[in-house]
Image (cartoon, helix red, strand yellow):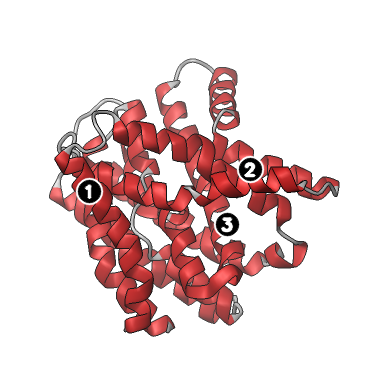
Amino acid sequence: MQAVLSVLLPIFALILAGFVAGRLGWLGDGATNSLNRFVVRLALPAELFQSMAQVTGSQIDHPGFLLCFGAAMLTTFGIGLALDLRRPVLRANKLSGAVIEGLAAGYANTAFMGIPLCLGVFGEAGLPPVILATLLTVCALFALAIALVELDLQSGHGTARTLLTVGIALIRNPLVAAPIAGAVVNLSGLTLGAPVLRFTGLLGDAASPCALVTIGLFLAEPMQGSAPMAALARVVALKLLFQPAMTAILALFVFHLPSLWSRSAILISALPVGTGPFMLARLYEREPGVASRATLISTVLSLITVSLLLSWID
């Protein structure tokens, strides 16, 4: 238990520090958006770029992990979307609202909490799994959600316009462009010089602490919009219980992953809802109440669920 607390306490202490700072107004108005933009547009892309540029083939040659984590993630997303579509409500663009709920159900906080947590539990060996999980979450799940929302909003405007809009949105997303650029550098055989590594290292090292403080600032803000309790219960249960359970079944009994990769997949799947669904919900004004409250509730409850899981891993 002492080892578990030594990993979790610094993470939740940073979240708490951001929460207190937000409640007391220490960082001023707009701090959440500014710090979040710094993480999303500079620090985290730098970390992902450097990781992908330096990762070796043996580190990422784990198709079982990709299939295991990806299948559980997409299945959770699909169930959340389908359950929300069955909700008897009258609203415009019902599909895009359901996409937000499905995204929140399957969108683990891989980048903001997964990276520091896996590094704390597994050391440097835990970085490749969480990088792959982050790429799957951002490049596959987030891209799929954007495509479905745009498809719903652009219905009647033609397939070509929808595809163009989605393509531009993905290309302009630093969380997608940075790891792809790193992979291009890696595949080209080029090596990053010492000044470049120093730059990306300094910038990337700021990603995790700033991201955790940002989560605290975000949780300190007044919740936006309404959120039916049934929808919240579905999202939180799918995220904290169903997704890690399905991942465990696939990792341990279907794909028989190596110990490090199976434990990493289960731990990452058990992380709470990330801020991505809320950012997308606020951007499109679709179910921001569900996304924000699901992030808050799942983050608080993950203190218990992740602690129990880490005890089992330890």
Residue 182 image position (x, y, % from top left) = 70, 45
Instruction: Please rate how many residues cluster around mark 1, counting C-alpha atoms within 10 Å: few if below 14, some from 14 to 19, many from 20.
Output: many
Q: Which mark is in front, 3 or 2?
A: 2
Quarter of the image that includes the C terminus: bottom left
Q: Is residue 124 above or below residue 206?
A: below
**Callout 1: SS:** helix
Direction from residue 218 to residue 43 in the image, left or right: right
Indicate left or right for 232 with 131 as reference.
left
Q: Earlier in the sequence, mark 2 or mark 1?
A: 1
How far apart are the alpha carbons under marks 3 and 2? 20 Å
Position in image of residue 161 (x %, y %): 56, 18
- Whether the residues at callouts 2 and 1 have beta carbons within 8 Å, the answer is no
Toward which corner of the image does residue 238 lie, by quadrant? bottom left
Position of residue 82 in the picture relative to residue 201 (left or right): left
Whole-percent x and y of residue 96? 36, 33
Among the two numbered marks 3 and 2 on one chain, the one whose residue lies closer to the N terminus: 3
Task: Check disc 2 and report the residue beneath it.
Answer: 199
Tag 3–tag 1 contact (CB < 8 Å) = no
Is residue 10 depicted above or below 292 in this figure? below
The residue nearer to you, when weighing 184 against 155, is: 184
Circle 2 packing at 10 Å, graded few (<14), some (14-19), many (20+), is: few
Q: Using the rendered image of the protein, determine whether residue 127 is visible from the camera's viewpoint.
A: yes
Residue at mark 3 to residue at mark 1: CA–CA distance: 27 Å
Q: Which label lies toward us, 3 or 1?
A: 1
Give the amino acid at mark 1: Phe
User: Residue at 48% of width from left, 48% of height from top?
Assistant: 206
Residue on which disc 1 sits: 19
Along the line of sight, which residue is nearer the eye, 15 or 178?
Answer: 15
Q: Residue at x 33, y 83 (%)?
A: 2
Residue at numbered disc 3: 131
Mark 3 Cα-neighbour bin, 10 Å: few <14, some 14–19, many ≥20? many
